[in-house]
């Protein structure tokens, strides 16, 4: 039990290494810094995916309480947006197909 998170920590340590290298770099070019952050982000997402974590897709989906939480209702968008996700305020995630955080969304009314 004490070492149960070893697989997770081992997967995330390379991302930590990249953050440390980025912070040690004295480059002040905003474009270069942004590109570096995007590379680290992609590596972090891949690490999470290797552990079974997946982002819940909400874009233009029908609202469902199985993996989403409605935090706002948006009126006046027309019948084609009624009951559909119009904005995702906070991404939701699953771990091995189990919801570990519901997506917080705005739904058309």
Image (spheres, rainbow, N blue to C red):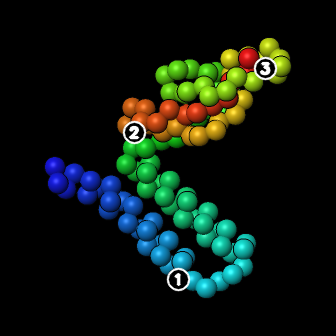
Q: Which mark is residue 24?
A: 1
Q: Nearer the viewer, mark 1 or mark 3?
A: 3
Give 88 or 8, whichever is nearer the viewer. 88
| Quarter containing the C terminus | top right
Q: Which mark is residue 75?
A: 3
Q: Bin the neighbour count of mark 2 within 10 Å (Cα to Cα): few under 14, some 14-19, many 20 and up.
A: some
Q: Could you tell whether 43 is left or right of 79 in the image? A: left
Residue at image position (56%, 20%) is: 64
Q: Earlier in the sequence, mark 1 or mark 3?
A: 1
User: Where 3 falls versus 94 (above or below)?
Assistant: below
**Nearest-to-viewer mark from 2 and 1:** 1
Percent across and percent down for residue 79 are: 80, 14
Query: Does the residue at mark 2 contact the one at mark 3 (Cβ under 8 Å)?
Result: no
Residue that sits furthest to the bottom in the current view: 26
Q: Residue at x 64, y 38 (%)?
A: 89
Q: Position of residue 101 (x, y in %)?
A: 46, 36
How far, Cα to Cα, is label 1 from label 3? Answer: 48 Å
């Amino acid at each position: 039990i004490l070492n149960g998170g070893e697989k997770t920590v081992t997967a995330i340590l390379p991302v930590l290494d990249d953050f440390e290298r980025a912070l040690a770099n004295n480059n002040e070019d905003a474009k270069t810094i942004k590109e570096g952050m995007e590379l680290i982000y992609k590596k972090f997402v891949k690490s999470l995916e290797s552990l079974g974590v997946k982002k819940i897709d909400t874009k233009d989906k029908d609202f469902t309480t199985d993996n989403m939480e409605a935090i706002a209702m948006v009126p006046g968008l027309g019948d084609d947006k009624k009951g559909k996700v119009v904005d995702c305020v906070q991404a939701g995630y699953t771990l091995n197909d189990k919801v570990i955080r519901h997506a917080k969304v705005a739904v058309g009314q």
